Image: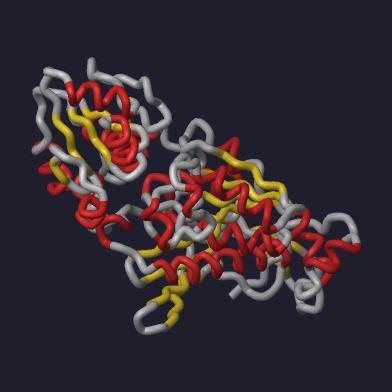
């Protein structure tokens, strides 16, 4: 295990208010006033304001990290609240970055929160990641994980990575060129391990179900997200020994941790440039290329209609004489709680898992009429619309989801 030099230079002396707020940090060996000044000067980017990002953001803000960036293009769904604890009931339907920003402003008013309400792409990732000292990757999809890893390797930025599935979690620190401390005040750089060293190829599509399909223990997110925040604090201050070169694996049912040693692949060529575009990252992961997105409400492709429509327009289309199909991509329990009359139920996981299952779900959609897709708030239906449209189906996500459609149909 290798000692790392502090990632961030110390900022100005702490004033009386900060000395009082961070009083429990100041006696800590390896942190102290100097480490707290490093935290205040640090810039940390959190990818995803979801299950892992929620605890990580709150503990980093509470720790006094000076600038926190948060990247997420999704909105708060009621099904998120079981684990995404930075959001509340009143935030349902709001952009997650706005909800997170408001919560962090109340928790730590002296922390600057930068909201990036976008999806990371090869076009914007270098500019966004390049503005930060460390990245916490809590993404829930493989294309984004590889994109973040590639950008961080190019920029020389360390990545604290976390992943969860049902009752299991993993955490690691990846850094293509870490700054090493030799104990005598000298610093050097050496080849470090990255996400691509450990996972050179993604798993086959459909073999790792998403949270909506496979489920996830809410409290697990708190455990793994808190460890991610701890690793970021250690990188910034130089305290302790980070997880660089190790993956910590957590089993919540057994309440056990185990560690796996990982090292750079000497045969792998370092990443010098990103893949061409979103489609290239999707293809690398065996997924269809994204088309438009929930933010691109007027997007059309291949002569298809718009990628999404308002609930009012959707209700009018359903009430008209033109043939149209309505598909509800929520889980069965969600449909039972708030049914939409006339909708065929096909949960989003069937479309988004890739492989033969996704192909079968897409082929079951009508090809001779527009297909309106609804979920709880519009996020899942937008992702399903992307996949279906890439296969030539005129699929359209209903903005605001089932609640908005039911209200518009009254």
Which residue is located at x 21 percent, y 46 percent?
A: 339
Q: Is residue 234 left or right of residue 23?
A: left
From what the image shows, is residue 285 above or below residue 231?
A: above
Q: Is residue 27 left or right of residue 393?
A: right
Q: Is residue 337 left or right of residue 369?
A: right
Where residue 238 appears, as percent x and y from the top left, is: 71, 68
Which residue is located at x 30 percent, y 26 percent?
A: 307
Please identify the residue farthest to the top as the structure is shown: 303
Q: Nearer the viewer, residue 157 or 295?
A: 295
Where residue 140 appears, as percent x and y from the top left, is: 39, 53
Quadrant location of the C terminus? top left
Query: Can residue 337 be seen?
Result: yes
Query: Can residue 386 be seen?
Result: no
Where residue 151 appears, as percent x and y from the top left, is: 53, 43
Q: Nearer the viewer, residue 382 or 277?
A: 382
Count of numbered labels shown in the rendering:
0
Which residue is located at x 57 percent, y 47 percent?
A: 70
Coloured how? secondary structure
Where residue 264 appears, as percent x and y from the top left, is: 48, 61
Q: Is residue 320 left or right of residue 233?
A: left
From what the image shows, is residue 364 above or below residue 394?
A: below
Which residue is located at x 61 percent, y 47 percent?
A: 101
Quadrant location of the N terminus? bottom right
- Quarter of the rendering containing residue 301: top left
- Quarter of the rendering containing residue 158: bottom right
């Amino acid at each position: 295990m290798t000692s790392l030099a502090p990632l961030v230079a110390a900022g100005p002396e702490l004033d009386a208010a900060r000395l009082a707020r961070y009083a429990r940090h100041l006696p800590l060996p390896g942190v102290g006033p100097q480490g707290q000044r490093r935290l205040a000067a640090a810039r940390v980017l959190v990818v995803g304001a979801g299950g892992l990002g929620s605890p990580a953001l709150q503990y980093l803000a509470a720790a006094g990290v000076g600038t926190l960036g948060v990247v997420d293009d999704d909105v708060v769904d009621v099904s998120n609240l079981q684990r995404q604890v930075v959001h509340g009931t009143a935030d349902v339907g709001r952009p997650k970055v706005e909800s997170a920003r408001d919560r962090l402003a109340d928790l730590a008013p002296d922390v600057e929160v930068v909201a990036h309400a976008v999806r990371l792409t090869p076009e914007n990732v270098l500019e966004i990641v390049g503005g930060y000292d460390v990245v916490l990757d809590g993404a829930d999809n493989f294309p984004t994980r590889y994109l973040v890893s590639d950008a961080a390797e190019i920029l020389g930025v360390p990545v604290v990575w976390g992943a969860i599935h049902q009752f299991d979690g993993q955490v690691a620190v990846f850094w293509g060129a870490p700054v090493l401390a030799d104990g005598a005040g000298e610093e050097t750089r050496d080849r470090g391990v990255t996400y691509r060293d450990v996972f050179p190829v993604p798993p086959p599509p459909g073999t790792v179900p998403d949270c909506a399909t496979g489920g996830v223990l809410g409290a697990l997110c708190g455990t793994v997200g808190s460890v991610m925040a701890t690793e970021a604090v250690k990188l910034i201050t130089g305290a302790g020994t980070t997880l660089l070169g190790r993956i910590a694996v957590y089993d919540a049912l057994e309440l056990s941790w185990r560690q796996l040693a990982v090292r750079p692949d000497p045969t792998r060529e370092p990443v010098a440039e990103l893949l061409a575009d979103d489609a290239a990252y999707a293809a690398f992961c065996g997924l269809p290329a994204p088309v438009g997105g929930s933010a691109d409400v007027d997007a059309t492709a291949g002569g298809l209609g718009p990628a999404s429509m308002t609930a009012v327009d959707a209700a009018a289309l359903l009430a008209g004489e033109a043939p149209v199909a309505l598909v509800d991509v929520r889980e069965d329990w969600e449909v039972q709680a708030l049914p939409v009359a006339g909708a065929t139920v096909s949960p989003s996981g069937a479309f988004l898992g890739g492989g033969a299952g996704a192909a079968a779900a897409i082929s079951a959609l009508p090809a001779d009429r527009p297909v309106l897709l609804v979920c709880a708030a519009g996020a899942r239906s937008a992702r399903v619309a992307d996949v279906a449209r890439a296969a030539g189906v005129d699929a359209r996500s209903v903005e605001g989801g089932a609640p908005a459609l039911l209200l518009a149909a009254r």
